[in-house]
Image (tube, helix red, strand yellow):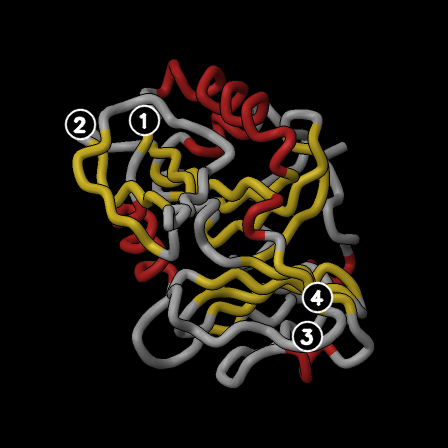
Amino acid sequence: MISAKMERRSPVHLPGKPEKTKMRDHWPVVLAYSEEGPGPWIVDFSHCRRWDIQSRDLDEALPSGASLPESPGSVVLHTTGLTGRAGQRQAFHWLFNDKAAAPAGFGCTEITEGSLCFALLGGDIFKITEKLTSLDLCDPKHSAPFLLIGPFSNITCQIVVLRNDPKNAAVLISCSRGFAHDMVRAVLAAGEEFGLRPAGERCLMEKLAECGLRESGEVVRKPSKADKAKPVGRSRS
């Protein structure tokens, strides 16, 4: 009897030479690339588990230990991932720990293999993103972390700004898997003059820890008055 060996594939292949890799839940995960340099970096984390949630009772769908953001545009970091609220009955849940409990219920749809997720980390990130979107990702009126939904490289995306410091930014972007190749090609072209390079999962986890994703405790960002005055995904005039 011949047993089939399953292997999942990321929707993109970043340039660069992987230095350390690991198989995780049938995903080949790059932990580090050779010559990652000082940044800025692009990190593919499409292998991390993700869900869209649509429900009247969003709280009930979330696993124990995960809090629901109070209003659209808000993001909560917890010990294993993050939760973003896109509407009164819409949210998403991303996990960076493959052993963490998943959301449950009829309104939960896993989108891990149907979407692209990547991070832009380090300095000059907002100089890169301003080439690709009219959304103001470094607006000081927003208190990070926050969520924007809108066009990025002409594709509707979920954009989580974990840190809006121009010298040390952290931005997570998700879109449909079918746009992955064109999206990443556009990002790499926009970042070429700033030395944008691929980095592995270790780089992302270090930045997440800096932003508040830790072994214990919880970071909750409550929307400010300025946030409430603006609709989610509003672009610059």
For disc 3, the marked residue is: 70
Residue tagged 4: 53
Earlier along the polypeptide chain: callout 2 or callout 4? 2
Residue type at mark 3? Glu
In the image, what residue type sits under mark 4? Ile
> For the residue labelled by badge 4, is the local secondary structure a helix, a strand or a loop?
strand
Q: Is 24 drawn above or below residue 82 in the view shown?
A: above
* C-alpha separation, residue under disc 2 versus residue under disc 3: 41 Å
The amino acid pointed to by label 1 is Arg
Tell me if label 3 and label 4 are in contact, CB under 8 Å.
Answer: no
Spatial CA distance of label 2 from label 1 is: 9 Å
SS class of the residue under badge 2? loop
Does label 2 or label 3 sit earlier along the sequence?
2
Would you name the residue on which mark 2 appears?
35
Dot 3: within a 10 Å radius of its alpha carbon, few (fewer than 14), some, or many (20 or more) residues? some
Q: Residues within 10 Å of mark 1 (few under 14, many from 20)?
A: many
Q: Residue at point 46% right, 38% down?
A: 10
Query: Can you say whether 96 is above or below 214 in the image?
Result: above
Mark nearer the viewer, 3 or 1: 1
